[in-house]
Amino acid sequence: MKIGIIGAGNVANAHAKAIQRVSGIDVAGVYDLDITKAQKIADFSQSKVCTTSMEVYDLVDAVIICTPNHTHFKYVVEALEHEKHILCEKPLATSNEQALEMYHRSLKSSTITALGFNYRFLPIVREIEKLILSDSLGELLWLSISFKRSSALTRKTFTWRDSAQGNSTSGAFGDLGSHLIDLLTYITKTNYELNSLKSRLATYVSHKDNQLVQVDDDARVNGRLENGTYFQINASKTSPIEENGLFIEVHGSKGELQYDSRDRSYYSLKSGLNWDIIPVEENEKNPQEQKREVPGWSSSFVSQIKAWRDRMINQESKTSTMLADFGDGVYVQSVLSQVLAETQYSLLRDKKSEGRLLKNF
Ligand SMILES: NC(=O)c1ccc[n+]([C@@H]2O[C@H](COP(=O)([O-])OP(=O)(O)OC[C@H]3O[C@@H](n4cnc5c(N)ncnc54)[C@H](O)[C@@H]3O)[C@@H](O)[C@H]2O)c1
């Protein structure tokens, strides 16, 4: 199966490396507005640099769309018109209308369309999903999930992520939080009670390259799921480096679970008075995994590509796979849009707090 990569930045790099670890699938063409970036990934994957997206469709059976959010719509529509299978990066779109249009178009085509919610494939997520499905934690009462990064502090240049062109979907909540919105509904198999959501989004780093940052860099959302479980989400790009990581807490009527990705290889489980330390099993362990990565992050791309390949080649049924599809993308978009539209989005451009946050960098 021949794959095209459209957009050759950070995440494209993770996909290209993952493809090398998967049989039956190879990169054939790479396109990026910036030809030097396309060249780098084409060299790595021994494939062709294309000067237009049309050239990519002529070479491949499927495409991975790794461009900024505000361009996903254009490339998804193009790829569907060329009857190419698609793995589109998250979030699917920049509005509900766009997401629905992409979904309806995908239903009319015979292609397999997947969405890049690769965190579903993290070993810890699989483990929690199993514990919940087996009722080991009992009735779910409260869930907390946080993803903390420092990128708003460390990336000094103004990019598409800082601009409003993605309709705010490239801020901390759209960028990191879209994974978390998906994870909560995925592991609990429950929807959000949309009218219960309470949120606070803030922009602590107000300027980059003397330009105004137009998106949030720290988001907190609380609410209830339709099964009655309360939750909180924190997606942050302004956390001190030593606090970076993925943090999950699940409180059920029979037990509690705590995960801190900085511990790397285990999580804690409490069923009576005592906490047990449980190792997290990794089937696809990447020997070159970076310590700053969430454990299993690079391998989650491998598992995702395998699941996509199996659906494309073997026509594996949709229900037997963890792979997210455009329907999941539409659902996450609806939660994301509601928070972005209704939140008390006050840009906290407090010079003092910016100074405090920037102190360590
Ligand atoms: N699944 C994940 O864990 C994950 C991680 C990072 C990013 N992402 C998603 O991947 C997408 C890209 O993010 P990134 O971090 O790789 O960004 P990036 O800025 O590193 O890369 C984007 C690339 O797209 C190119 N580009 C911009 N506009 C283009 C256009 N119109 N046509 C063709 N190429 C264009 C840029 O030159 C750049 O090389 C985003 O949607 C982001 O949300 C997902």
Image (tube, grey):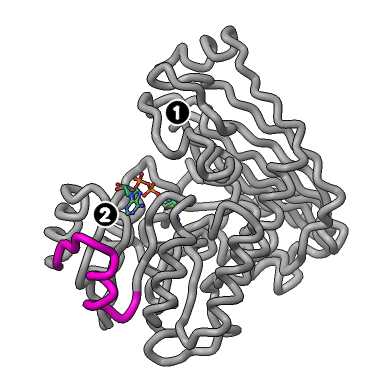
* Magenta range: 48-62
Task: Name the residue at 77% across, 41% down.
Answer: 342
Q: Which residue is mark 1?
A: 241
Q: Within the magenta stretch, is there residue 53?
A: yes
Could you say whether the residue bearing mark 2 is in a helix, strand or loop?
loop
Residue 307 marker: none
Quarter of the picture containing the N terminus is bottom left
Please give left or right for residue 128 compared with residue 21 in the image. right
Find residue 106 and report its horizontal and vertical position in percent. 53, 78
Q: Amino acid at mark 2?
A: Asp
Find residue 197 and report its horizontal and vertical position in percent. 81, 46
Q: Which residue is mark 2?
A: 32
Q: Within the magenta stretch, is there residue 89?
A: no
Q: CA distance from mark 2 to mark 1?
A: 31 Å
Task: Name the residue at 18% across, 51% down.
Answer: 35
Sequence-first tag of 2 and 1: 2
Q: Residues within 10 Å of mark 1 (few under 14, many from 20)?
A: some
Quarter of the picture containing the C terminus is top left
| Foreground residue among 101 and 352 | 101
Could you say whether the residue bearing mark 1 is in a helix, strand or loop?
helix
Q: Is mark 2 within 8 Å of ligand 1?
A: yes
Where residue 155 sits, quadrant-wise, is top left
Whether residue 237 is visible to the viewer of this picture, yes or no, is yes
